[in-house]
Amino acid sequence: MRRKHFLKGIPAVATLSVLAILGLKSVAVDFDQYRSYSALISDQLVNEAAVQLALQNIRYTISQNGQSLNTALLEAEKVQAQLMGQIPPSLSAAEKTRLRKQLEFNAELLSEKRQLIEQLEVHHAELRTALTQEPNLLNGLNGSLRLEIEALLDDLFLYAVTSDKKLIADIETKFSRLGPRLGSGPITEPQVAQLVQLVLDNKPAADQLIADVFDLPLTNNIRALEKQFDDIQQTTQKRVALYRNLAYVLLFTGSGVVAFWVINRLRRTSQQTVRVLESITDAFIALDRTWSITYVNAQAADILKCDISGLLGQDFWKILPESLGKRFTEYYHEAVATNLQVVSFETYYEPTERWLMVRGYPGIDGLSIFLQDFTERKQAEEQLLELNRDLDNRVKDRTAQLASAMEEAETARVKAEDANRSKSEFLANMSHELRTPLNAIIGYSEMLEEDVTSIGEEDFVPDLQKIQGAGKHLLGLINSVLDLSKIEAGRMELFLEDICVKTIMDEIIGTIQPLAQKNFNQLYVSCPNDIGMLHADQVKLRQSLINLLSNACKFTEKGKITLAVEPIMMANSQGSEDRGLKFMVTDTGIGMTPEQMGKVFQAFTQADTSTTRKYGGTGLGLTITKQFIAMMGGDVSVDSTYGEGTTFTLAIPRMVQVDRPSEETFFAPPIRLIERESIAAIHELSGKSSEKTILVIEEDVNARESLHGWLTDAGYNVVCAVDGQQGVVLANEHLPDAILLDIMLPQEDGWAILQGLKAMPTLAPIPVLAITDDSNRAHQLGAAGCIPKPVDHIRLLDILETQLPDHECPKILVVEDDVNAREIMGRFLQQYNWTIVLAASGQQALNYINDTVPDLIVLDLMMPGMDGFEFVQILRQNPGWRSIPIIVVTAKTLTAKDQQRLDGVVQVYQKADFNRQDLLNEVRALVTANVDSASVVR
């Protein structure tokens, strides 16, 4: 079918194409351009005639080239250029070539004419010069000689004007007669001869040039060009007329064909419309503007109970029953009057007991009416309404049941939340109430170990170390159980930060090295220098790697353990790939069977009972490790061969993201124990010594003992060092009030030691007295004073009194509700010359701060009444307390929201695993900085 229509359309397309081509060819010719070009050729003929006329005038007047000749030549050259550049574009290529060839020849002739006229001007100038000399020749002459010379000059002038060659013989005869008479007069013979020769030489040459100009065929060529272009113009006109006539013929022929096709198409369309109207199931009636019936189909005749022939031409209002016609007269008339509104209504037709949908469509010729039987649909709608009423009743019953179920679900949800909250309360309370006494046991055992060591009772040290080990082991088990419980309860959160991978690898190796050496294992590390950074939870990553390395050390004896890291590409949750890191812990230990590997990550599960008996452990480390890494979007896998070794692989993205950070901080109230001691009132503990400490760095024994004796007798606490290295260690440990340094140490550079002391932030504020004669250099390097050898003890004491005025000891406020933890922290900080103030609650601490502002606060968070968070907030709201440095020591695991609430706190330590020496160094640095800043302000 498509091919048939395509073939039928080919003649029409071809005809339209030919019409378009002929039309374009006829329109493309611009006869205005032709007329303009003909006018230019005519102008060129006029210009050529003007040049010829000007030359005739110059020829007989021997005058200089006039304005008319120059203007005519310039105009001719201008028109020549226009003729070359304005050739009509509609000309054929051959016609353009012939025109250009003729024009180029004319341009050459015009250029040659210009050159001949310029040469003519040269000869005419010579003639004008000769003729202007005639009056000069007659000056001073008279008589017959003057008359003869005048006759000769008249003949020369006449010859120059007329070009009469007969005059040449008379001129020569007269000149020969004058020759003898010109010898002795005022006019010589050469002068006359030169004049005669100029005229006789230049006049023939000028006449020849004018003849050459007239002989140039430029005028004929221009006429030939004019005739050639006229022929082209006539040919073009004939061709364009032919194109237009052909286009008219094709247009008229095509219009006839199209008209025939349209009429035939309308006839077939009309037949198809009739067939369609006869084939539809709806009844159809067509009316004209006079409401006469022009067409009905068989279905309409059946409804009206009439023959089709009996309906045609009848009045619509008389034929149609009232239920179809007169009852809806207003609708019909409005549709016909507006020619826009469509009539549409439903009616019950009683003769056939059917429901009919009547639709009337107005048109230019009248109204078209469709009658559709929708009785079955009407019946179906009534049935549907009945079903909807039944469905509404069912929906109401179901809604009531759903509401009851939702109430039950809400009750269950509240119970579940209460149960989850109870579990969270249990975890929070267990975290505090279990860790607090364990921290007290560990703290007291460490203090007892220091005390028995200081008094020489070292037999008790092993037992105290066993107490510490057992306490730390039990604390580790409790931490593991609580961590697992937090993960299951959804309370474990990530604290993401940027981590230098190489740095954390070095720190982990330093931590695990003693454990590896315990079983005589060799520890190796493989970490590229350019491994870069990692954004993850540093604490959980460190704990996971330490768990894997601890297991490797525990299950390997006299073997090899390797920690390696390398970059990888790993799939993310969206299905694409991200950059990541792969940590591998490989050992040459006992290995595992496939059955053991299948349950290695199950909680409270180890390889078998024999393994538990031999190596110990709870089976929680690997479970917690896998959960931690999974929280960071990574995975932990294992590969092992029994009897050969095991490899644990930990894969983690370089950029860890938290899907849903916790926004709620749950803070359970502490459990009230009956045996807990009542909260004590606030009290102070003085430091172990109020004496000022002097550090003496002197290698000479006699000088050192002499200084020790003098300073001790003066009431100072003296600490001695035999060299600079020991002096730096003792200075960091004791933080003395002053340092006495001998610059001339035999084995070391005393100046370098002085520079090192002043370069350390914690030691720089301590005044250094240099024992040297070079006071200028000592002061330049930061020494507070100088004293030469031998040391004048009286002068030394005077300098010390000047450098060490009496001042109050720094005050450290410890806020802790647990009496044991409070006492341990106080005794731990009491070993230095600090005043320790102990407060059992946040309110007690605020009451103390109202009277005395401390230099530092050590704060617990989980306290009854006012907790640590509220205490920090109150301090930050008071401008006078806002600058007090705060160190938090807590058993609470902090969430992201907790860390935001503690913004501005110097440091946070966990009671479960903090290093006491790190805490002590932090306190010393903060106290020193705060005291120095207060001194500057004062």
Image: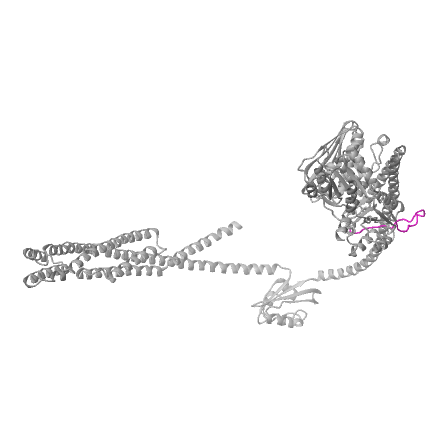
For this rendering, which residue is in front, 378 or 591?
591
On the image, the x and y values in percent for residue 435 come to 86, 43
**Image check: 761 left or right of 424?**
left
**In the rendering, at what x and y percent does residue 143 appear?**
6, 63
| Left or right position of 262 against 212 | right
Q: Nearer the viewer, residue 30 or 901?
A: 901
Q: Give residue 485's quadrant in the image.
A: top right
Magenta region, main secondary structure: loop
| Residue depicted at 59% across the width and 59% down the height | 276
Above/below status of 25 relative to 556: below
Specify the segment rendered in magenta: 663-683
Count of numbered marks: 0
The answer to whether residue 597 is visible is no
Q: Position of residue 272 (x, y in %)?
A: 56, 58
Q: Is residue 224 above or below residue 347?
A: above
The colour scheme used here is one colour
Q: Is residue 750 left or right of residue 253?
A: right
- Residue 525: x and y, percent? 72, 33
- Nearer to the camera, 418 or 933: 933
Q: Does the magenta-highlighted stretch encompass residue 670?
A: yes
Q: Is residue 936 visible?
A: yes
Q: Is residue 343 magenta?
A: no
Relative to 53, 630 lies left or right? right
Q: Foreground: 394 or 855?
A: 855
Quarter assignment of residue 349? bottom right
Please, which residue is most extreme toward the right here?
Answer: 674
